[in-house]
Structure formats: structure tokens, C-alpha cells
């Protein structure tokens, strides 16, 4: 077992204290830096930094960054969701470590969606119904993996389907 435990730090954004969502840091008891290339292969991270090592991925609509001694998770509903996601990551980290001999490690990030391709599909009305100030900001949130087509109430069904198809090639659910 590589990761024996962690402690959670739950907080609201200091930049936007009125935000509804929470963020968390999981402070890890053990250094997991050596497993990151294996975890990248298993979980399909879209961002990988070699020095200092860090893996960024999207799961359950959350943007997650794993560092050797800390995991950061954004846009959480509550502490229970934070605990659930970090416990899942602990299992994934330990499974990847235990099975590392049968996993081809990767330090390459996956191809990411293009901002302009996402923006082309949006209505460009800047209606703010999605919770973002502009369609451009919404498009940035989409390519970051924070939001997807379901968050845009103004988007016609055929454009939602087109965006879902486009994002699927990047392992965006």
C-alpha cells in the first residue's frame, strides 16, 4: 500500500467567498509521486507535469490535481462528496501502485478540447444562465473540465449533442 491515509482541508474559494461550491485539499500521509505516471495511464489524465510532478484529471465533473503530497479537488457540493472522491483516489492510487508492473507508465497529457471549437457551439448570448459572466468564460470552464453542455440552459438540443460528441473524444463525460 503506497497511500496509507490523508487529512482533508475543506474551504470556500478565497477569490469568491459567495460561491456555493467547496474545494478541498487532501494532505497525504505518504509521497505518491512515483505512482503518477501509472495513474495517468489508468485514469487518463489530461495534464501531466514532470517537474515538480503533478497529474490533472477530470472525474465526476470535478477537476482534480494530484501532487506527490497533496490532492486538490474543485467544485464540491459538501464534505461527504470530498471524502468520497478522495477515498476513491486513494483506492486508485494503491491499485495502480500494486499493478504497476502490468501498466505502461505515461507522462503525456491527453489531447485537450480547443476553446474556439467549444465557443463555436455556444449561443454567444452572454445570458449568464449558466452561472458564468460570458459564454467565453463558460467555454473556458468546459475545456478545464469543470462544466459541460448540460450547464447551458440556452443551448439547443442538437448543439448539446454536438458538444457531447466533441468532448467525448477527450474523455470528458
Image: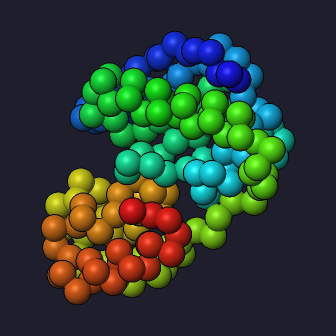
Percent x, y for residue 64? Answer: 52, 42
Q: Is residue 11 visible?
A: yes
Quarter-wise, where is residue 46 in the image?
Answer: bottom right
* Left or right of 61 in this view: 149: left
Q: Is residue 25 above or below residue 153?
A: above
Percent x, y for residue 104? Answer: 78, 55
Q: Residue at x 18, y 81 (%)?
A: 157
* Left or right of 92 in this view: 34: right
Q: Residue at x 47, y 17 (%)?
A: 8
Q: Residue at x 49, y 57 (%)?
A: 144
* Quadrant where the image shows the C terminus: bottom left
* Left or right of 123 in this view: 166: right
* Quadrant where the image shows the N terminus: top right
* Camera-nearest residue between 111 and 16: 111
Q: Give the mark count.
A: 0
Q: Is residue 71 above or below residue 44?
A: above
- Residue extending farthest to the right is 51
Quarter-wise, where is residue 90 in the image?
Answer: top right
Percent x, y for residue 71? Answer: 57, 30
Q: Residue at x 60, y 57 (%)?
A: 44
What colouring does the structure picture have?
Answer: rainbow
Percent x, y for residue 74? Answer: 43, 38
* Camera-nearest residue between 47 and 154: 47
Quarter-wise, where is residue 11 in the image?
Answer: top left
* Left or right of 104 in this view: 26: left
Q: Is residue 72 visible?
A: no
* Camera-nearest residue between 169 and 78: 169
* Camera-nearest residue between 91 and 31: 91
Amino acid at each position: 500500500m503506497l497511500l496509507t491515509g490523508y487529512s482533508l482541508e475543506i474551504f470556500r474559494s478565497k477569490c469568491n467567498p459567495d460561491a456555493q461550491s467547496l474545494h478541498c485539499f487532501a494532505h497525504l500521509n505518504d509521497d505518491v509521486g512515483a505512482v503518477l505516471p501509472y495513474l495517468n495511464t489508468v485514469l487518463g489524465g489530461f495534464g501531466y507535469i514532470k517537474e515538480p510532478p503533478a497529474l490533472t484529471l477530470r472525474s465526476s465533473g470535478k477537476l482534480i490535481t494530484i501532487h506527490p503530497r497533496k490532492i486538490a479537488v474543485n467544485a464540491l457540493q459538501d464534505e461527504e462528496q470530498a471524502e468520497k472522491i478522495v477515498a476513491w483516489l486513494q483506492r486508485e492510487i494503491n491499485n495502480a501502485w500494486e499493478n504497476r508492473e502490468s501498466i505502461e507508465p505515461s507522462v503525456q497529457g491527453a489531447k485537450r478540447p480547443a476553446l474556439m471549437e467549444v465557443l463555436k457551439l455556444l449561443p454567444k448570448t452572454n445570458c449568464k444562465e449558466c452561472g458564468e459572466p460570458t459564454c467565453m468564460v463558460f467555454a473556458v470552464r468546459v475545456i478545464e473540465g469543470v462544466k459541460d453542455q448540460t450547464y447551458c440552459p440556452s443551448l439547443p438540443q442538437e448543439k448539446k449533442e454536438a458538444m457531447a460528441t466533441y468532448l467525448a473524444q477527450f474523455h470528458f463525460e
